[in-house]
Amino acid sequence: MSKGQCHPSESRQFADPQTGAPVRQVTSQESIHHHPFYYLPAYDDAMRRLYFISHRTGSPQIFAEIRETGELRQLTDRPDLNEWSVHPSHDGRFVYFTVGSGAWRVETESLEEEEMADFGGGEIREQGMVGAAMGTTTLSRDDRWWAVPVKSGETARLVVIDTESGRSEVILKRDTIGHPQFHPDDPNLLRYAGPYHSRLWVIGRDGSENRLVYGRDAGKKEWIVHETWRPGSNELITTNWPHGMIGINVRSGAVRPVCRFNAWHPMINRSGDLVVADTKTPDCGLQLFDPLDGEGIPRPLCLTESSNAGDHWNTDHCPYDDGPVDVFAPQHTHPHPNFSPDGGGGWSSPRTAAGWRRSTRRKFCSGRWRWFPTCERSSHNPWRELSAGWTSRRTGRSAGLLQVGNLHHVCSYGVQNSSARRSLMNPWAGAWVIMRSIVADSAAAWGVTPQAQKTGTKSGGRSPTGSP
Protein backbone atom coordinates (compact mmCIF):
# COMPACT_ATOMS: atom_id res chain seq x y z
CA MET A 1 0.00 0.00 0.00
CA SER A 2 1.37 3.41 -0.92
CA LYS A 3 0.49 7.06 -1.19
CA GLY A 4 -2.03 7.72 -3.95
CA GLN A 5 -3.34 4.17 -3.99
CA CYS A 6 -7.10 3.89 -4.31
CA HIS A 7 -8.97 1.05 -2.66
CA PRO A 8 -12.39 -0.08 -3.82
CA SER A 9 -15.34 1.12 -1.82
CA GLU A 10 -15.81 -0.84 1.39
CA SER A 11 -19.20 0.70 2.00
CA ARG A 12 -22.13 -1.50 2.82
CA GLN A 13 -25.66 -0.82 3.97
CA PHE A 14 -27.45 -2.69 6.72
CA ALA A 15 -30.16 -2.18 9.26
CA ASP A 16 -29.17 -1.56 12.83
CA PRO A 17 -29.99 -4.74 14.78
CA GLN A 18 -31.61 -2.78 17.62
CA THR A 19 -33.65 -0.10 15.88
CA GLY A 20 -33.77 -1.03 12.21
CA ALA A 21 -32.17 2.31 11.31
CA PRO A 22 -30.22 2.22 8.03
CA VAL A 23 -26.47 2.27 8.55
CA ARG A 24 -23.65 2.71 6.07
CA GLN A 25 -20.36 1.10 6.97
CA VAL A 26 -17.55 3.06 5.35
CA THR A 27 -14.55 0.80 6.03
CA SER A 28 -14.22 -2.89 6.73
CA GLN A 29 -10.46 -3.54 6.63
CA GLU A 30 -9.21 -5.13 9.85
CA SER A 31 -7.31 -2.27 11.49
CA ILE A 32 -7.94 0.88 13.49
CA HIS A 33 -9.75 3.72 11.74
CA HIS A 34 -10.80 7.00 13.31
CA HIS A 35 -11.75 10.51 12.29
CA PRO A 36 -9.99 13.69 13.55
CA PHE A 37 -10.53 14.77 17.15
CA TYR A 38 -14.15 15.39 18.06
CA TYR A 39 -14.35 19.19 17.59
CA LEU A 40 -12.37 19.11 14.30
CA PRO A 41 -14.01 18.57 10.91
CA ALA A 42 -13.89 15.22 9.09
CA TYR A 43 -15.19 16.71 5.83
CA ASP A 44 -14.39 19.69 3.65
CA ASP A 45 -17.28 22.17 3.61
CA ALA A 46 -18.57 20.90 0.26
CA MET A 47 -18.41 17.33 1.62
CA ARG A 48 -16.55 16.04 -1.42
CA ARG A 49 -14.28 13.95 0.77
CA LEU A 50 -14.56 12.31 4.15
CA TYR A 51 -11.16 12.23 5.88
CA PHE A 52 -9.99 9.65 8.37
CA ILE A 53 -6.91 7.93 9.76
CA SER A 54 -6.30 4.31 8.84
CA HIS A 55 -3.73 1.92 10.30
CA ARG A 56 -4.17 -0.55 7.45
CA THR A 57 -0.62 0.05 6.17
CA GLY A 58 0.90 -0.80 9.56
CA SER A 59 1.17 2.85 10.63
CA PRO A 60 -1.36 5.70 10.87
CA GLN A 61 -1.90 7.42 7.51
CA ILE A 62 -4.41 9.95 6.19
CA PHE A 63 -7.11 8.54 3.91
CA ALA A 64 -10.14 10.05 2.24
CA GLU A 65 -13.35 8.50 1.03
CA ILE A 66 -14.20 10.10 -2.32
CA ARG A 67 -17.89 10.69 -1.76
CA GLU A 68 -18.80 10.56 -5.46
CA THR A 69 -17.29 7.13 -6.10
CA GLY A 70 -16.87 5.64 -2.64
CA GLU A 71 -13.19 4.89 -3.32
CA LEU A 72 -10.77 5.13 -0.41
CA ARG A 73 -7.61 7.04 -1.36
CA GLN A 74 -4.40 7.05 0.67
CA LEU A 75 -3.10 10.63 0.97
CA THR A 76 0.12 10.14 2.98
CA ASP A 77 2.87 7.60 3.52
CA ARG A 78 4.83 8.93 6.48
CA PRO A 79 6.59 6.98 9.26
CA ASP A 80 6.08 9.72 11.87
CA LEU A 81 2.59 11.12 11.29
CA ASN A 82 0.89 12.55 14.39
CA GLU A 83 -2.54 11.08 13.80
CA TRP A 84 -4.41 13.51 16.10
CA SER A 85 -2.92 16.64 14.49
CA VAL A 86 -4.88 16.15 11.26
CA HIS A 87 -7.12 19.03 10.14
CA PRO A 88 -8.72 19.18 6.66
CA SER A 89 -9.03 22.64 5.16
CA HIS A 90 -12.58 23.88 4.83
CA ASP A 91 -12.20 24.55 1.10
CA GLY A 92 -11.05 20.95 0.50
CA ARG A 93 -7.67 21.85 -1.03
CA PHE A 94 -5.38 20.60 1.74
CA VAL A 95 -5.08 18.43 4.79
CA TYR A 96 -2.81 19.85 7.51
CA PHE A 97 -0.83 17.65 9.89
CA THR A 98 2.35 17.44 11.95
CA VAL A 99 5.11 14.86 11.67
CA GLY A 100 8.12 14.52 13.96
CA SER A 101 9.29 18.10 14.44
CA GLY A 102 7.58 19.69 11.45
CA ALA A 103 4.23 21.05 10.27
CA TRP A 104 3.06 19.98 6.80
CA ARG A 105 0.13 19.97 4.45
CA VAL A 106 -0.80 17.69 1.56
CA GLU A 107 -2.70 18.87 -1.51
CA THR A 108 -5.74 16.63 -1.87
CA GLU A 109 -5.67 16.33 -5.68
CA SER A 110 -1.97 16.14 -6.58
CA LEU A 111 -0.88 14.76 -3.16
CA GLU A 112 2.07 17.15 -3.26
CA GLU A 113 3.34 17.80 0.27
CA GLU A 114 4.65 21.11 1.56
CA GLU A 115 6.51 21.79 4.78
CA MET A 116 4.94 24.80 6.51
CA ALA A 117 7.30 24.97 9.50
CA ASP A 118 10.35 23.18 10.93
CA PHE A 119 10.47 23.29 14.71
CA GLY A 120 14.08 22.19 15.02
CA GLY A 121 14.34 18.49 15.76
CA GLY A 122 12.91 16.23 18.43
CA GLU A 123 9.30 15.49 19.32
CA ILE A 124 6.99 18.50 19.52
CA ARG A 125 4.31 16.86 21.68
CA GLU A 126 4.12 16.30 25.40
CA GLN A 127 4.39 12.78 26.73
CA GLY A 128 1.17 10.82 27.25
CA MET A 129 -2.03 10.06 25.36
CA VAL A 130 -4.53 12.70 26.49
CA GLY A 131 -4.86 16.47 26.48
CA ALA A 132 -1.85 18.40 25.20
CA ALA A 133 -0.02 15.12 24.48
CA MET A 134 -2.37 14.49 21.56
CA GLY A 135 -0.91 17.40 19.60
CA THR A 136 -4.20 18.59 18.09
CA THR A 137 -3.99 21.65 15.83
CA THR A 138 -6.56 24.19 14.61
CA LEU A 139 -7.26 25.92 11.31
CA SER A 140 -9.27 29.14 11.11
CA ARG A 141 -12.61 28.92 9.29
CA ASP A 142 -11.22 31.01 6.41
CA ASP A 143 -8.25 28.57 6.11
CA ARG A 144 -5.77 31.48 6.45
CA TRP A 145 -4.29 30.69 9.87
CA TRP A 146 -3.05 27.41 11.34
CA ALA A 147 -2.20 27.22 15.05
CA VAL A 148 0.15 24.46 16.20
CA PRO A 149 1.18 23.80 19.82
CA VAL A 150 4.88 22.86 20.14
CA LYS A 151 6.48 21.47 23.31
CA SER A 152 10.24 21.67 23.75
CA GLY A 153 11.63 20.76 27.13
CA GLU A 154 9.64 22.52 29.81
CA THR A 155 8.24 25.18 27.49
CA ALA A 156 5.15 24.99 25.32
CA ARG A 157 4.79 27.42 22.43
CA LEU A 158 1.73 28.26 20.37
CA VAL A 159 2.85 28.86 16.80
CA VAL A 160 0.51 30.54 14.30
CA ILE A 161 1.32 29.93 10.62
CA ASP A 162 0.06 32.12 7.79
CA THR A 163 -0.97 29.51 5.21
CA GLU A 164 -0.72 32.03 2.36
CA SER A 165 2.73 33.50 3.00
CA GLY A 166 4.23 30.63 5.00
CA ARG A 167 5.36 32.99 7.77
CA SER A 168 5.02 31.78 11.34
CA GLU A 169 4.97 33.51 14.70
CA VAL A 170 5.17 32.29 18.28
CA ILE A 171 2.28 34.04 20.05
CA LEU A 172 2.52 32.32 23.44
CA LYS A 173 5.02 30.56 25.69
CA ARG A 174 3.96 28.83 28.88
CA ASP A 175 3.94 25.50 30.75
CA THR A 176 1.32 23.62 28.71
CA ILE A 177 -0.93 24.34 25.71
CA GLY A 178 -3.55 21.82 24.64
CA HIS A 179 -6.44 21.51 22.18
CA PRO A 180 -6.36 25.01 20.62
CA GLN A 181 -9.41 26.02 18.61
CA PHE A 182 -10.12 29.11 16.52
CA HIS A 183 -13.46 30.76 17.12
CA PRO A 184 -15.72 29.60 14.25
CA ASP A 185 -16.76 33.19 13.46
CA ASP A 186 -13.59 35.11 14.34
CA PRO A 187 -10.13 34.18 12.97
CA ASN A 188 -8.55 36.59 15.44
CA LEU A 189 -9.65 34.69 18.56
CA LEU A 190 -8.59 31.30 19.91
CA ARG A 191 -9.22 29.29 23.01
CA TYR A 192 -6.87 26.66 24.43
CA ALA A 193 -6.51 24.36 27.42
CA GLY A 194 -4.06 25.14 30.19
CA PRO A 195 -3.30 22.90 33.20
CA TYR A 196 -6.19 21.00 34.80
CA HIS A 197 -6.58 23.47 37.67
CA SER A 198 -6.92 26.48 35.34
CA ARG A 199 -8.18 24.99 32.09
CA LEU A 200 -10.03 27.57 29.99
CA TRP A 201 -7.99 30.32 28.31
CA VAL A 202 -8.52 32.64 25.36
CA ILE A 203 -5.93 34.55 23.37
CA GLY A 204 -5.86 36.85 20.35
CA ARG A 205 -4.23 35.53 17.19
CA ASP A 206 -1.53 38.19 17.64
CA GLY A 207 -0.80 36.95 21.18
CA SER A 208 -2.71 39.71 22.94
CA GLU A 209 -5.24 39.35 25.76
CA ASN A 210 -4.12 35.94 26.94
CA ARG A 211 -6.36 35.30 29.94
CA LEU A 212 -8.12 32.69 32.05
CA VAL A 213 -11.88 32.88 31.51
CA TYR A 214 -13.12 30.54 34.22
CA GLY A 215 -11.84 29.92 37.73
CA ARG A 216 -13.01 26.50 38.84
CA ASP A 217 -14.29 25.71 42.33
CA ALA A 218 -11.17 24.07 43.76
CA GLY A 219 -12.99 23.18 46.96
CA LYS A 220 -15.35 20.96 45.00
CA LYS A 221 -12.47 19.64 42.87
CA GLU A 222 -14.33 20.60 39.71
CA TRP A 223 -13.10 18.82 36.59
CA ILE A 224 -13.51 21.26 33.71
CA VAL A 225 -12.77 19.46 30.45
CA HIS A 226 -13.80 19.06 26.78
CA GLU A 227 -14.67 22.60 25.83
CA THR A 228 -15.71 24.04 22.47
CA TRP A 229 -17.01 27.33 21.07
CA ARG A 230 -20.74 27.85 20.59
CA PRO A 231 -21.09 29.34 17.08
CA GLY A 232 -22.66 32.78 16.85
CA SER A 233 -21.72 33.70 20.39
CA ASN A 234 -18.86 34.54 22.76
CA GLU A 235 -19.58 31.42 24.77
CA LEU A 236 -17.55 28.32 25.50
CA ILE A 237 -19.56 25.26 26.45
CA THR A 238 -17.65 22.77 28.54
CA THR A 239 -18.11 19.62 30.56
CA ASN A 240 -17.98 19.80 34.36
CA TRP A 241 -17.38 16.10 34.69
CA PRO A 242 -19.48 14.16 35.54
CA HIS A 243 -22.18 16.59 36.66
CA GLY A 244 -23.15 18.10 33.32
CA MET A 245 -22.10 21.09 31.24
CA ILE A 246 -21.83 24.81 31.73
CA GLY A 247 -21.58 27.76 29.33
CA ILE A 248 -19.08 30.56 29.95
CA ASN A 249 -19.26 33.91 28.19
CA VAL A 250 -15.61 34.83 27.58
CA ARG A 251 -16.46 38.55 27.38
CA SER A 252 -18.77 39.05 30.36
CA GLY A 253 -17.72 36.07 32.48
CA ALA A 254 -21.35 34.97 32.87
CA VAL A 255 -21.77 31.27 33.66
CA ARG A 256 -24.95 29.29 33.02
CA PRO A 257 -26.06 25.64 33.16
CA VAL A 258 -26.24 23.77 29.83
CA CYS A 259 -27.14 20.20 30.83
CA ARG A 260 -27.17 17.97 33.91
CA PHE A 261 -26.15 14.53 32.65
CA ASN A 262 -22.82 12.84 31.97
CA ALA A 263 -22.07 14.47 28.61
CA TRP A 264 -18.51 13.33 27.85
CA HIS A 265 -17.30 14.73 24.51
CA PRO A 266 -19.96 17.30 23.57
CA MET A 267 -19.96 18.88 20.12
CA ILE A 268 -22.31 21.52 18.78
CA ASN A 269 -23.61 21.96 15.23
CA ARG A 270 -22.78 24.98 13.10
CA SER A 271 -26.16 26.57 13.79
CA GLY A 272 -25.34 26.51 17.50
CA ASP A 273 -28.69 25.01 18.47
CA LEU A 274 -28.03 21.29 18.87
CA VAL A 275 -25.38 19.31 20.74
CA VAL A 276 -24.42 15.67 20.52
CA ALA A 277 -22.44 13.99 23.27
CA ASP A 278 -21.19 10.53 24.02
CA THR A 279 -21.53 9.21 27.58
CA LYS A 280 -19.53 7.04 29.96
CA THR A 281 -20.12 5.32 33.31
CA PRO A 282 -22.66 4.40 32.33
CA ASP A 283 -22.33 4.43 28.58
CA CYS A 284 -25.85 5.43 27.60
CA GLY A 285 -24.93 5.96 23.99
CA LEU A 286 -25.02 9.20 22.04
CA GLN A 287 -27.39 11.85 23.33
CA LEU A 288 -28.82 14.91 21.58
CA PHE A 289 -29.86 17.99 23.51
CA ASP A 290 -30.68 21.68 23.26
CA PRO A 291 -27.74 23.81 24.49
CA LEU A 292 -29.81 26.97 24.85
CA ASP A 293 -32.72 26.15 27.17
CA GLY A 294 -30.69 25.72 30.37
CA GLU A 295 -31.98 22.18 30.84
CA GLY A 296 -30.31 20.15 28.09
CA ILE A 297 -32.65 17.19 28.47
CA PRO A 298 -30.99 14.29 26.63
CA ARG A 299 -32.68 12.54 23.73
CA PRO A 300 -31.07 9.16 23.01
CA LEU A 301 -29.81 8.75 19.47
CA CYS A 302 -27.95 5.45 19.54
CA LEU A 303 -25.66 3.16 21.45
CA THR A 304 -21.97 3.28 20.56
CA GLU A 305 -20.61 -0.07 21.79
CA SER A 306 -17.25 1.67 22.23
CA SER A 307 -14.82 0.37 24.81
CA ASN A 308 -14.26 3.89 26.19
CA ALA A 309 -10.85 3.22 27.76
CA GLY A 310 -9.87 5.44 30.69
CA ASP A 311 -10.54 4.31 34.26
CA HIS A 312 -9.61 7.76 35.57
CA TRP A 313 -13.05 8.91 34.42
CA ASN A 314 -14.73 6.75 37.05
CA THR A 315 -14.94 9.58 39.56
CA ASP A 316 -17.17 12.37 40.79
CA HIS A 317 -14.39 14.98 40.87
CA CYS A 318 -11.09 15.83 39.21
CA PRO A 319 -8.77 12.87 39.83
CA TYR A 320 -5.65 15.00 39.35
CA ASP A 321 -6.47 16.77 42.61
CA ASP A 322 -5.77 13.50 44.41
CA GLY A 323 -2.23 13.16 43.08
CA PRO A 324 -0.52 11.79 39.96
CA VAL A 325 -2.77 9.66 37.76
CA ASP A 326 -1.56 6.74 35.65
CA VAL A 327 -3.71 7.35 32.58
CA PHE A 328 -4.36 4.67 29.99
CA ALA A 329 -6.92 6.04 27.56
CA PRO A 330 -6.27 5.29 23.88
CA GLN A 331 -8.27 7.98 22.12
CA HIS A 332 -9.43 5.72 19.30
CA THR A 333 -11.54 3.85 21.86
CA HIS A 334 -13.70 6.95 22.45
CA PRO A 335 -16.75 7.74 20.27
CA HIS A 336 -15.94 11.47 19.77
CA PRO A 337 -19.19 12.38 17.95
CA ASN A 338 -19.38 15.35 15.62
CA PHE A 339 -21.64 16.89 12.99
CA SER A 340 -21.02 17.17 9.27
CA PRO A 341 -20.79 20.70 7.79
CA ASP A 342 -24.36 20.70 6.44
CA GLY A 343 -25.85 18.84 9.39
CA GLY A 344 -27.07 16.14 7.03
CA GLY A 345 -24.46 13.41 7.16
CA GLY A 346 -21.55 12.36 9.33
CA TRP A 347 -20.17 9.67 11.56
CA SER A 348 -22.08 8.01 14.33
CA SER A 349 -23.78 4.89 15.58
CA PRO A 350 -27.43 4.49 14.56
CA ARG A 351 -28.89 3.17 17.78
CA THR A 352 -31.78 4.82 19.54
CA ALA A 353 -33.23 3.74 22.84
CA ALA A 354 -36.53 3.15 24.53
CA GLY A 355 -37.88 5.94 26.64
CA TRP A 356 -38.66 8.53 23.96
CA ARG A 357 -41.38 8.89 21.38
CA ARG A 358 -41.65 11.01 18.30
CA SER A 359 -43.64 14.21 18.02
CA THR A 360 -44.30 16.11 14.83
CA ARG A 361 -41.93 19.03 15.36
CA ARG A 362 -38.65 19.34 13.52
CA LYS A 363 -35.82 21.86 13.38
CA PHE A 364 -35.33 24.10 10.34
CA CYS A 365 -31.60 24.54 9.73
CA SER A 366 -29.43 25.75 6.86
CA GLY A 367 -32.42 26.62 4.70
CA ARG A 368 -34.21 23.29 4.85
CA TRP A 369 -35.64 20.78 7.25
CA ARG A 370 -32.87 18.83 8.94
CA TRP A 371 -32.14 16.54 11.79
CA PHE A 372 -34.71 14.68 13.78
CA PRO A 373 -38.23 15.14 15.00
CA THR A 374 -38.37 16.65 18.44
CA CYS A 375 -38.74 13.85 20.95
CA GLU A 376 -40.84 13.83 24.07
CA ARG A 377 -40.26 11.65 27.04
CA SER A 378 -42.48 8.64 27.57
CA SER A 379 -43.07 6.71 30.76
CA HIS A 380 -39.94 4.62 30.23
CA ASN A 381 -36.68 5.58 31.93
CA PRO A 382 -34.20 6.04 29.08
CA TRP A 383 -31.19 5.78 31.37
CA ARG A 384 -32.37 2.45 32.73
CA GLU A 385 -33.23 1.14 29.29
CA LEU A 386 -29.94 2.30 27.82
CA SER A 387 -27.81 0.86 30.58
CA ALA A 388 -29.64 -2.44 30.89
CA GLY A 389 -27.84 -5.48 29.66
CA TRP A 390 -24.65 -4.03 28.24
CA THR A 391 -22.05 -4.44 30.95
CA SER A 392 -20.37 -7.63 29.75
CA ARG A 393 -17.92 -6.22 27.21
CA ARG A 394 -14.77 -7.61 25.68
CA THR A 395 -12.80 -5.97 22.94
CA GLY A 396 -12.23 -7.13 19.41
CA ARG A 397 -9.40 -6.54 16.98
CA SER A 398 -10.72 -4.94 13.86
CA ALA A 399 -11.85 -1.54 12.86
CA GLY A 400 -14.32 0.01 10.50
CA LEU A 401 -16.05 3.29 9.81
CA LEU A 402 -19.81 3.48 9.85
CA GLN A 403 -22.13 6.44 9.30
CA VAL A 404 -25.31 7.71 11.01
CA GLY A 405 -27.03 10.95 10.12
CA ASN A 406 -25.45 14.28 10.98
CA LEU A 407 -22.86 12.71 13.23
CA HIS A 408 -19.57 10.97 13.15
CA HIS A 409 -18.00 9.02 15.96
CA VAL A 410 -15.78 6.08 16.66
CA CYS A 411 -17.55 2.92 17.70
CA SER A 412 -15.74 -0.04 19.16
CA TYR A 413 -17.75 -3.18 18.60
CA GLY A 414 -16.99 -5.33 21.64
CA VAL A 415 -18.39 -8.81 22.08
CA GLN A 416 -21.58 -8.56 24.10
CA ASN A 417 -24.43 -10.76 25.23
CA SER A 418 -26.25 -10.64 21.93
CA SER A 419 -26.03 -12.88 18.92
CA ALA A 420 -27.27 -9.97 16.78
CA ARG A 421 -24.24 -7.91 17.88
CA ARG A 422 -21.88 -10.78 17.38
CA SER A 423 -22.93 -11.23 13.78
CA LEU A 424 -21.70 -7.71 12.96
CA MET A 425 -18.28 -8.15 14.46
CA ASN A 426 -15.06 -9.42 13.10
CA PRO A 427 -14.63 -13.05 14.18
CA TRP A 428 -11.43 -12.16 16.02
CA ALA A 429 -12.58 -11.45 19.55
CA GLY A 430 -11.02 -10.56 22.85
CA ALA A 431 -7.70 -9.04 21.78
CA TRP A 432 -7.96 -5.29 21.23
CA VAL A 433 -10.48 -2.63 20.30
CA ILE A 434 -12.61 -2.83 17.19
CA MET A 435 -13.01 0.71 15.95
CA ARG A 436 -15.97 1.49 13.77
CA SER A 437 -17.22 4.89 12.74
CA ILE A 438 -20.80 4.95 11.64
CA VAL A 439 -22.99 6.94 9.26
CA ALA A 440 -26.74 6.60 8.64
CA ASP A 441 -29.74 8.62 7.61
CA SER A 442 -30.71 10.65 10.65
CA ALA A 443 -34.38 11.01 9.85
CA ALA A 444 -34.62 7.28 9.28
CA ALA A 445 -32.83 6.68 12.54
CA TRP A 446 -35.70 8.41 14.32
CA GLY A 447 -38.32 6.97 12.01
CA VAL A 448 -38.13 3.53 13.58
CA THR A 449 -39.65 2.35 16.81
CA PRO A 450 -36.95 1.97 19.47
CA GLN A 451 -36.77 -1.46 21.04
CA ALA A 452 -35.60 -1.80 24.61
CA GLN A 453 -32.81 -4.31 25.04
CA LYS A 454 -33.11 -6.55 28.05
CA THR A 455 -30.36 -9.01 27.25
CA GLY A 456 -27.53 -9.73 29.64
CA THR A 457 -26.81 -8.32 33.06
CA LYS A 458 -28.42 -5.08 34.13
CA SER A 459 -25.80 -2.47 34.84
CA GLY A 460 -25.47 -0.60 38.06
CA GLY A 461 -26.28 3.01 38.85
CA ARG A 462 -25.34 6.06 36.85
CA SER A 463 -21.79 6.75 37.98
CA PRO A 464 -19.50 9.36 36.41
CA THR A 465 -16.65 9.08 33.88
CA GLY A 466 -15.18 10.63 30.72
CA SER A 467 -11.96 11.46 28.73
CA PRO A 468 -10.02 14.54 27.63
Image (cartoon, rainbow, N blue to C red):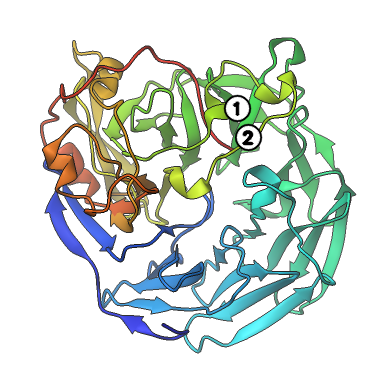
Q: Which residue type does callout 2 highlight?
A: Glu
Percent x, y of residue 117: 77, 74
Residue in the foreground of this view, choosing between 354 and 424: 424
Q: Which residue type does callout 1 highlight?
A: Gly
Residue at 27% x, 53% y is: 428
Percent x, y of residue 125: 73, 56
As measured in the structure, the alpha-carbon distance from the residue carrying label 2 to the one carrying label 1 is 6 Å
Q: Earlier in the sequence, mark 2 or mark 1?
A: 2
Residue at 58% x, 57% y is: 84
Quarter holding the N terminus?
bottom left
Percent x, y of residue 331: 52, 47
Taking 132 as reference, is 280 above or below it? Answer: above
Quarter holding the C terminus?
top right
Residue in the foreground of this view, choosing between 110 and 209: 110
Q: Secondary structure at mark 1?
A: strand
Q: Give the side of residue 181 with respect to residue 290, left or right.
A: right
Taking 17 as reference, is 263 above or below it? Answer: above
Q: Secondary structure at mark 2?
A: strand
Which residue is label 2 attached to? Answer: 235
Answer few, some or many: residues within 10 Å of disc 2's Cα (few below 14, many 20 plus, some between 14 and 19): many
**CB atoms at circles 2 and 1 under 8 Å apart?**
yes
Q: Give the side of residue 285 with respect to residue 183, left or right.
A: left
Which residue is label 1 attached to? Answer: 247
In which image quadrant can residue 143 be found? Answer: bottom right
Residue at 67% x, 19% y is: 222
Percent x, y of residue 298: 36, 24
Taking 129 as reference, is 148 above or below it? Answer: below
Residue 410 visible to the viewer? yes
Residue in the foreground of this view, choosing between 350 and 80: 80
Taking 206 as reference, is 131 above or below it? Answer: above
Q: Give the side of residue 162 with respect to residue 411, left or right.
A: right
**Tag count:** 2
